[in-house]
């Protein structure tokens, strides 16, 4: 059993925890500040529900105020009707601009990837990126996802115009390693740590009553 909780420093404190319904408004404000995609308020409510697994990267200030500075929201589907294997789809992913290029986005992605493979037994990771968003495309390309196809009019943008998307995909292999410690003081919430330390298992017939 892996036991790795990175201690928080006194100067700057980050926390990775699950999103709850109380976070909906703050997450909507945060994501609207980093994307040109137009999402409804109901979309942000849905990613706080149990069908999704949504990790938030939180910056905690000295007065203990929490600010959302990163998100990784993903959902799963069954790979086929005859196994308990799954495929994972990242619905939202992003880091606040002033926190980029520091390794935080890579760490959040690595956590996401490890949880998908180790806990949920996902064999594939997928993500749609707006065709014009070269920065996001490159971020995921460098982490092993490759463009598969272009989907026309996939996104509705804030400008009101539709936008093509590129479907990116990556097989999740058995050799995915536990995320390496960073130079940042990051605390992992115990509920997230549970997914890192364990593997979900259930019998074949239980699958028919379980959500992916």
Image (tube, rainbow, N blue to C red):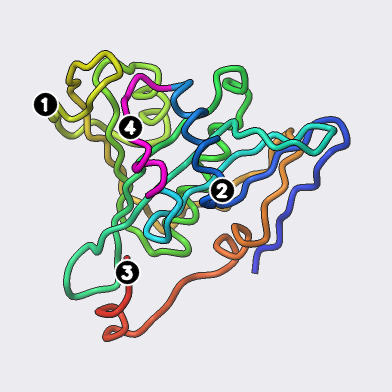
Q: If you read the primary sequence from the N terminus, does the residue marked by circle 2 or circle 1 appear first?
A: 2
Residue under circle 2?
22
Q: How far is disc 4 from disc 1 in space, using C-alphas?
A: 17 Å
Q: Which residues are magenta?
A: 35-46
> Callout 4: helix, strand or loop?
loop
Q: If you read the primary sequence from the N terminus, does the residue marked by circle 4 or circle 1 appear first?
A: 4
Q: How far is disc 2 from disc 3 in space, using C-alphas?
A: 23 Å
Q: If you read the primary sequence from the N terminus, does the residue marked by circle 1 or circle 3 appear first?
A: 1
Q: Residues within 10 Å of mark 3 (few under 14, many from 20)?
A: few
Q: How many marks?
A: 4
The picture quadrant where one finds residue 205 is bottom left
> Callout 2: helix, strand or loop?
helix
Q: Residues within 10 Å of mark 4 (few under 14, many from 20)?
A: some
Tell me what residue is drawn at x 35 percent, y 19 percent: 36
Q: How far is disc 3 from disc 4 in space, using C-alphas?
A: 24 Å
- Say whether residue 91 is left or right of residue 59: left
Tell me what residue is drawn at x 54 percent, y 47 percent: 111
Q: Position of residue 32 (x, y in %)?
A: 44, 25
Q: Residues within 10 Å of mark 2 (few under 14, many from 20)?
A: few
Mark 2 or 1: in front is 2
Q: Position of residue 211 (x, y in %)?
A: 32, 69
Q: If you read the primary sequence from the N terminus, does the residue marked by circle 3 or circle 4 appear first?
A: 4
Q: Position of residue 96 (x, y in %)?
A: 55, 24
Residue under circle 4?
39
Tell me what residue is drawn at x 49 percent, y 53 percent: 114
Mark 3 or 4: in front is 4
Residue under circle 1?
152
* Residue 36 counted in the magenta span: yes
Residue under circle 3?
211
Q: If you read the primary sequence from the N terminus, does the residue marked by circle 2 or circle 3 appear first?
A: 2
- Say whether residue 188 is left or right of residue 202: right
> Callout 3: helix, strand or loop?
loop
């Amino acid at each position: 059993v892996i036991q790795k909780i990175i201690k928080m420093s006194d100067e700057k404190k980050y926390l990775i925890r699950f999103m709850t319904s109380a976070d909906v408004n703050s997450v909507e404000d945060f994501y609207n500040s980093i994307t040109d995609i137009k999402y409804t308020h109901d979309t942000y409510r849905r990613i706080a529900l149990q069908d999704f697994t949504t990790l938030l990267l939180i910056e905690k200030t000295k007065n203990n105020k929490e600010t959302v500075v990163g998100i990784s929201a993903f959902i799963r589907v069954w790979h086929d009707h005859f196994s308990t294997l799954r495929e994972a789809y990242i619905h939202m992913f992003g880091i606040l601009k002033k926190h980029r290029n520091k390794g935080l986005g890579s760490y959040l992605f690595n956590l996401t990837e490890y949880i998908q493979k180790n806990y949920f037994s996902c064999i594939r990771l997928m993500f749609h990126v707006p065709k014009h968003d070269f920065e996001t495309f490159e971020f995921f390309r460098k982490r092993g996802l490759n463009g598969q196809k272009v989907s026309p009019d996939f996104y509705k943008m804030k400008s009101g115009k539709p936008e093509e998307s590129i479907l990116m995909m990556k097989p999740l292999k058995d050799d995915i390693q536990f995320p390496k410690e960073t130079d940042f003081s990051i605390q992992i919430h115990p509920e997230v740590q549970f997914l890192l330390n364990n593997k979900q298992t259930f019998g074949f017939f239980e699958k028919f009553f379980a959500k992916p």
